Amino acid sequence: MMQKKYIWLISIAAVIVIILIGGKIYMNSLDKKEVEHEKKVQQLVKAEEYMALYLVRNYEGVHTIEFHPVTQTKETGFWHGSIDVNNGSTLTFSMRNLSDFDDIGIRVNPKTFDLNKKKKSLNEDLENVKIKYWRGNNGDGTGL
């Protein structure tokens, strides 16, 4: 009789230990996913700032910039998005890696993009430009 109590007690203790270990592993995986997500958001913030500077330094008359959602194509791994400039000119961009600015491809459609390219790239800042960043917020609070 006493032996059955010990077996039950050991069994219950083992189950509790397994649940605690499993919970700890699960929480660590959630923390890791959150850290990875935060890293992607920070990379996206830097990419958006880089593209805004590119526009101001290379095109005449940039007054407003609005970034639209950025998505990643699972098959290719490329990130894609679009930017409205001055509430009328739209350009699209793609990049293989959010942290490699040398790899950004920018495409404009001459029918929908009417800004003139500057003769010389100037070292201007974003002080006089109204910018609406997307920054990884897809509108439902989940981010990327």
Image (tube, rainbow, N blue to C red):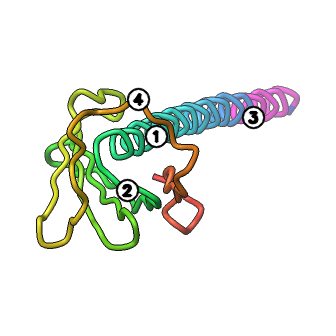
**Mark 1 surroundings within 10 Å by alpha-carbon count, few (fewer than 14), some (14 through 19), many (20 or more):** some
Q: Which residue is mark 1?
A: 49
Between the C-alphas of marks 3 and 4, the distance is 62 Å
Q: Which residue is mark 3?
A: 16
In percent of width and height, residue 121 lies at 28, 33
Q: Earlier in the sequence, mark 3 or mark 4?
A: 3
Q: Which residue is mark 2?
A: 61
In percent of width and height, residue 136 lies at 49, 51
Q: Which residues are magenta?
A: 2-15
Tell which tag, 1 or 2, sits nearer the viewer. 2
Q: Earlier in the sequence, mark 3 or mark 2?
A: 3
Front residue of this view, candidates 94 and 140:
94
In magenta stretch: residue 11: yes
Tell which tag, 3 or 4, sits nearer the viewer. 4
Q: Earlier in the sequence, mark 4 or mark 2?
A: 2
Residue 120 in the figure: left or right of residue 20: left
**Mark 2 surroundings within 10 Å by alpha-carbon count, few (fewer than 14), some (14 through 19), many (20 or more):** some
Residue 123 tag number: 4
Residue 133 in the figure: left or right of residue 93: right
Q: Main secondary structure of the magenta part?
A: helix
**Mark 3 surroundings within 10 Å by alpha-carbon count, few (fewer than 14), some (14 through 19), many (20 or more):** few
Asked whether the residues under the numbered discs 3 and 4 touch, taking CB atoms below 8 Å apart as contact, a structural biologist would say no
